[in-house]
């Protein structure tokens, strides 16, 4: 008798989103533009035009910069 070979089930990896929700207007319209040569990251909302700029460390990703942006907004440093 020959056994049947079981097929492997592959689950797709979850990816980090590229567009985030804005803490001010609530829409999913926030982009993080990272400029590695200048070591800066700019966070821009496409709807309400809320922007801020952050220094960029070599290990930072877009989600890290977005979290700093929301923390700064929740504290009240951004208007």
Image: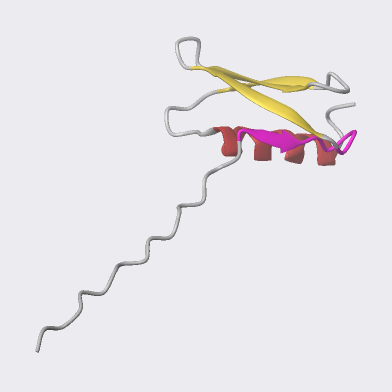
Work out which residue is located at the far bottom of the displayed protein and give it. Answer: 1
- Which residue appears at 81% of the width and 35% of the height? 22
Task: Name the quadrant of the N terminus.
Answer: bottom left
Q: Quadrant of residue 31?
A: top right
In the image, is 7 to the left or to the right of 2?
right
In the image, is 23 to the left or to the right of 10?
right
- Which residue appears at 77% of the width and 20% of the height? 51
Between residue 50 and residue 72, name the one nearer to us. Answer: 50
The image shows residue 6 at horizontal and vertical percentages of 26, 74
Work out which residue is located at the far left of the displayed protein and give it. Answer: 1
Task: Name the quadrant of the C terminus.
Answer: top right
The image shows residue 15 at horizontal and vertical percentages of 52, 45
In the image, is 37 to the left or to the right of 43?
left
In the rendered structure, which segment of residues is drawn in magenta? 18-26
- Which residue appears at 37% of the width and 66% of the height? 9
Which secondary structure dominates the residues rendered in magenta? loop
The magenta stretch spans residue 40? no
The magenta stretch spans residue 19? yes
- Which residue appears at 29% of the width and 69% of the height? 7
Work out which residue is located at the far front of the displayed protein and give it. Answer: 1
State whether residue 38 is above or below residue 63.
Answer: above
Q: Quadrant of residue 49?
A: top right
The image shows residue 11 at horizontal and vertical percentages of 43, 60
In the image, is 50 to the left or to the right of 66?
right
């Amino acid at each position: 008798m020959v056994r049947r070979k079981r097929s492997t089930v592959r689950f797709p990896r979850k990816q980090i989103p590229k567009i985030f929700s804005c803490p001010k207007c609530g829409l999913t319209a926030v982009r993080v533009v990272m400029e590695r040569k200048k070591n800066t990251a700019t966070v821009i909302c496409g709807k309400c035009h809320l922007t801020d700029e952050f220094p960029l460390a070599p290990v930072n990703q877009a989600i890290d910069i977005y979290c700093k942006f929301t923390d700064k907004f929740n504290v009240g440093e951004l208007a």
